[in-house]
Every structure is written in C-alpha cells, then in structure tokens.
Image: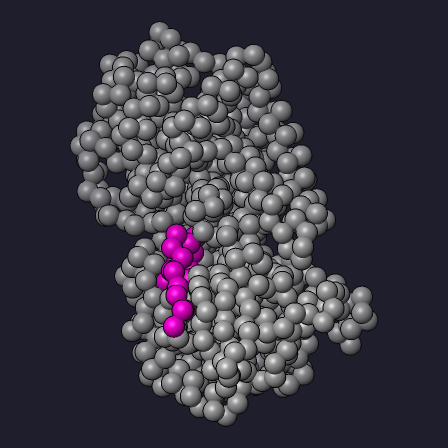
Amino acid sequence: MDFDLPEELEEYRKKVREFARKEFTPELAEKCDRDEKYPDELRKKTLAEGLVDFSNPWKTMIAIEEMCRVDPGLGISATVPYFGAEVLMLHGSDHLREKYLSRVAEGKAIMGLGVTEPGGGSDVAGLKTNARKENGKYIVNGGKMFITNGSIADFFVMLVRTSPPDDPKKRHHGLSVLVVERNFKGFDSNQLKGKLGVRATNTAELILNNVEVPEENLVGEEGKGFYYIMEFFNISRVFVAAQSIGIAQGALDRATAFLMNEESRGHFVGEERKFKLAEIATRVEASRLLMYKAASYLFNYRPNPMITSMAKGYASETATFAAETAMEITGATGLQTDLERLFRDSKIMEIWEGTSEVEKIVISRMMMKGDKNE
Amino acid sequence: MNDQTEMMMDNIGQFAKANINDIALKIEREGVSEDLYNSLIQQGLIGANLPAEMGGAGLDRTSYDAILFQLARASPSVAFHVFMNNSIILKILEKASKKDIIDRIVSGKIRLGLIPGNIIEGSSEKSNIIIEPSKMNIYIGTENASLIDGMPDLLKSKSLGLRGLKTDLFTSIKEGEKLLPYSDVEKIWNEASWDAAAIFLGISEGALEKAIEYTKVRKTFNFPLKDYEPVAFRLSELKSELEILKNTLFSDDSKEQMGMMLKTISAEFARRATKYALQFHGGYGYLEDFGVEKFYRDAVALNALMFRPILDKRTLAASIYGEKSGYL
C-alpha cells in the first residue's frame, strides 16, 4: 500500500499552493469577508492558470484543499463556478453539455445547483418547487434557499417536482432536473447577507414565478432527478471533505507557527498546548486518509457512499475542532488574525452538502443493510 | 437562589427585553451605542457590584452575576461591556482608591478602555488588543496596572470575531500612572471568575433557548426536529448540564476556588452548547438574522478574553494540590 500521491499531483499541489499564497492576499481576503463580496477576478485568474480542472477530480480535490488552507472564503469562491457540473456531465444531453458547460470552462459563465428549499434542507424529497408541462415547456414555480452562486450564476441545475409521487412513501419519485437560466422570465434572486463565515462566497434565495423552461433543458430522464442529485452529493461530499481538510490544515499551520514563535521568543510552551497541537495534526491526517479512500473509490467509478459520508462527516468535524482548538491555543492573538476567519468559515462544513447528522444516517443505514466496507 | 438575586433576574430580564432584544442585531453590527450605554448607567448596572461607599450599588455576588447572566442571554457583547467595567476596571480603581475617576465612570461622564495585556493569554507585541479604546485606558502590563491618558496609536484592525465590541490593536502606548502591582490585578482576575462564568452560562442559555424553540417548529421528513432522538437527547443533556452549573453559580458559595472551577467548566460548556445550538438550526443558524451565530462566535471570542486555558488551570491545579502544580 502506497500512501504517497503520484509525483504529478504533488507538483500540482505545489503549484496551487504558490498561486494561493500569491493571489489570496490578506487584503483581498479581509475585504471579501467584510463586504461579503464574491472575488470574480480571482475566479478568472484561477481558470486562466488552469488550476481548476474538472476533467481531473484528483486535481480538483487537491486544489480545493490547498486553496482553503490559505483562505476558505476565497478558496471556495475560486473553485465553485462549476458547482453542479457533474450532474450535467453524467446525465445531460450533448446539446446541454455543449451549450452550458463549455461557457463555464471558458470562464464566460458561472453555474449553480438549486436543490435546498426554505422548508427543507436535509429532506430533499420533500421539496415543493414544481414544474408542469405546457406547450413544450416546463412552467416552474417555487423557491430555493441557501444557493451557492445564487445571485451571480448564469444558470442552475435545479431539482423540481414534475409529477406527484406514485406512492406517498416514495416521495423521491417524480422529481426531475432542469437547467434554469437566470435570464428566463419569472426568475429572481436575493443575496443572503450576514453569514457567519465563507462570506466571500455568494449565497442567495431563488424565486421562481412561472418560469418557462424549454423542454430540451430536462437533464436525463424525467422522474430520475432524486437519484442524479444523490449521486452528485456522493461526489460533492468528497470535495467538502477537501474544503474541511484545507481549513483544518490552515488552522494547524497557524497554531504551529504561533507556538514556534512563542518558543523562539523564549516563552514557555507547555505540553498542554503541544498535546492539543498533536491532536489536531492527528485528526487532520486521519481525515485526509479517509478522504483519499473515498476519492479512490469514487474516481475509479466504484462510489462507496458509506466511506464518502465518513470522510465528509469526520473531515467537517475536524475542521471545526481544529479551528476552535487553534483559537484556544493562540488566545488573544488568534482573535485578531485570520485564524478567527477560519474559525467562522469552518462551521458551515458540518451543515452543507449533508449535515453531520445526515452523514451518520447514511453510515448507520448502510452498516445495518450489511453494506460494510469489506 | 436568594430573593434578591431572583428579583434581579426578573428586573434585568425585563431590562434586556425593553432595551436589548430588539436591537441585538444592531449591537452586533455597530457595537454598544451611547444610548444603550446610558441606559446601563441609568439602570445602575455600571458600578452595580461596587460598595456603596465607593459610589456603587453594593450588590452581593449572586445578584451581580444575575445581571451578567441575563445580559449575556440577550447580548454577550453588552454583558462583557458590564463585566469589563465592573469586574476589572472599577475593581482596579477601587483597590487603587481612585474614587474621583470611579465617580465619573459610574455617573457616565467618562468611559475607560481596557488593554488586558498580560492578564490574558496570547498577547504579544504584534497583537496587543485594546477593548473599547477611549481617551483614558487601563493598561495591564507585566508589572503593574496603569492609567494611560490619551488614545494609543491604533492599527485599525478589522476582526469580525467580536462584532459587538470595539476592539483594535495598537503599536505603542506612553507610560501611564501606576495604579496597582500585577499581583493585585491577578487577584482581581481570579475573583472575577464567578462573573466570567455567569457570562458563559448566560451565552449558553441564550443559545439553547433558541435551539429548543427552533426545534419545536422546524420540521424535517414531516416531523419536528425535537421528535428525533439525536436532537432531543442532546439538547436535553445540555440543558441539564446548564441547570446544574446555574445551581452552583447562584449558590451562596463565593469561594475563589469554586469560582475558578465553575469558570473552567463553563468556558468549555459554552463552546459546546452554542455549537450544538447552531448545528440544530441548520443553514439558518449560519445567518445573523436568526440570532444564534453570535452566541457561537462570542463563546469562542470571549474565551480568549475571559478564560486562560493555561494560567487559570494552573491556578486551579495549585488550589487542588495545595502547592504549585502543572507548570512543566
């Protein structure tokens, strides 16, 4: 068993790290955090440098981790213009892929994923947004909540109900995925301000009032939407694990530098704080190994949702643990540095793309189905 | 809880309802306004624990901690404001017999800033924090606490961690009038452990109340969140811990050792309780409008200002062993 990444990926990691250190300036990070402003120039630079390559998921995962290590708000912003692309890649028609994804790859468009609704986060199948067919079009009504890129994306891969479930116990039946453009009549969005963290990223509420969507914008088959989205979450959760590990590693870097500086100044650093540092380091390493295992299954076309949920759940809890413990280690210094921002950024990791509770439901359900990691 | 403390709990609960609850979000965005500060003065909350002969209200420990607890439930920033003035600044001035300055503070004529310096952990020449910078500030240095006349050169730091308080960093300060030796300040700090615990527990109660209310009405998979074991059990466990800690806080005990024990446990508890409270709000908890993220943020930020994970635990260890302990 070899725990090292191939040399090519290690080289890529170095390249991303250098880019992030150079471009993610403290001033930019602070400004985007304070003003809740999406760093669009950074998105363009990242694409121009070829640092976001969704044709290579290993590279994507490493880019996300390294960028979030420097600054999570900027790192997520730079790597999220493709959010939801996998649904189109795997199930979209050639026409849809060509029409929409190529523009994102060229940096001419941003996309988003519209799943969560105001009344239901974890309960995806309980969504209320509906689409009825009329004269070769879908007429969409409803609303979406907490949508990343919500007020800046040009189009959304959106989960809607196209028919009532055939059985009340099978609410996940009758859901479909449509591509909905911002400039379709009846579409509106409101940016959500006042977030605790990842304030550089754009989050919005979407309002859909008789939005007319061409029939050709149906992704895959009608009624299969729930399965497509669950499949997508299995992919995106690996990337959230990468965001989380980036944050945890970033907190570890800062806490280590603080203690080294304390020692170099002749200040006593006792074992209590060193043990805390060791605990963060151990959890970061364990999270990374779990993520690599989940990624290895997934990227070799053998997805293992249980391992993916373990990776996402554990890494996200490691992110908050690491950031909070680093704050404790650094005390007043941490409060006045970008570590404090990492701390605020970390909490969302335990919430988006499946809360920690949802990950535990997935893990325990699969364990009890006998679907163990054997 | 004695009658006086119970009455104080009711009074301050009403005060918070009338003066803080509706502007809690504004406090997070803009800090404690002059108007609100004047209300604190008029209510007699600044100077509440000072002896009457020094111009204060002379409240006993539990009544004073009831004030901090209730204020923290509504706004941790306001509670810290009162703590900083009463438990640290006025106590230093009282011990230094600076009645003239105390009178001006208690009557609302002046406000002092605090540079906690060496009394908190993690201060360095690069990040010497000043809280509510003013024309006159108390500076706690390595050897003395001193009174600094004039505003230090500020760095215009823009941390969003403690949004309801004005904090900054400074480059240098001029020497001030010596007030007390450091050892006396350390004693004041240790005596204030009960007060810090009151704030940590108030933060916890504020956050848990919100989580309990939210999980009654928020449904997922057709059932309220409270109907799910992991939610109901966790919040019930946290509420139980909180009630037991409150019993200690509002007991007649005022021993310094018990105060330090309670602060040590409450500081960690506040971080844990607020984290679960936010988690059970899901994505909405991440938005300031829902009023729970401030508790999560402040539980950690105020840990850095009111609890010293090494020095306080060393004090606690020494009191347990009866001799110097936990220093290697």
Percent x, y for residue A250?
45, 63
User: Is residue B147 something one can see in this rendering?
Assistant: yes
Left or right, B127 with respect to B248, comes to left
**Count of numbered circles on the image:** 0
Does B197 appear in magenta?
no
Q: Residue furthest front?
A: A135
Residue B326 in which image quadrant? top right
Highlighted range, magenta: A185-204
Percent x, y for residue B138?
29, 29
Q: Is residue A360 above or below residue B24?
A: below
Give the quadrant of the C terminus of chain A. bottom right
User: Is residue A62 something one can see in this rendering?
Assistant: no
Observer-nearest of A129 and B78: A129
- Residue ID at (42%, 54%): A195
Observer-nearest of B310 and A12: A12
- Residue ID at (55%, 50%): B281
Percent x, y for residue B161?
39, 47
Q: Is residue B302 above or below residue A56?
A: above
Observer-nearest of B101 and A57: A57
Observer-nearest of B286 and B317: B286
Percent x, y for residue A371?
78, 73
Q: Is residue A243 above or below residue B269?
A: below
Q: Secondary structure of the magenta portion, mostly?
A: loop
Does A187 appear in magenta?
yes
- Residue ID at (44%, 90%): A98
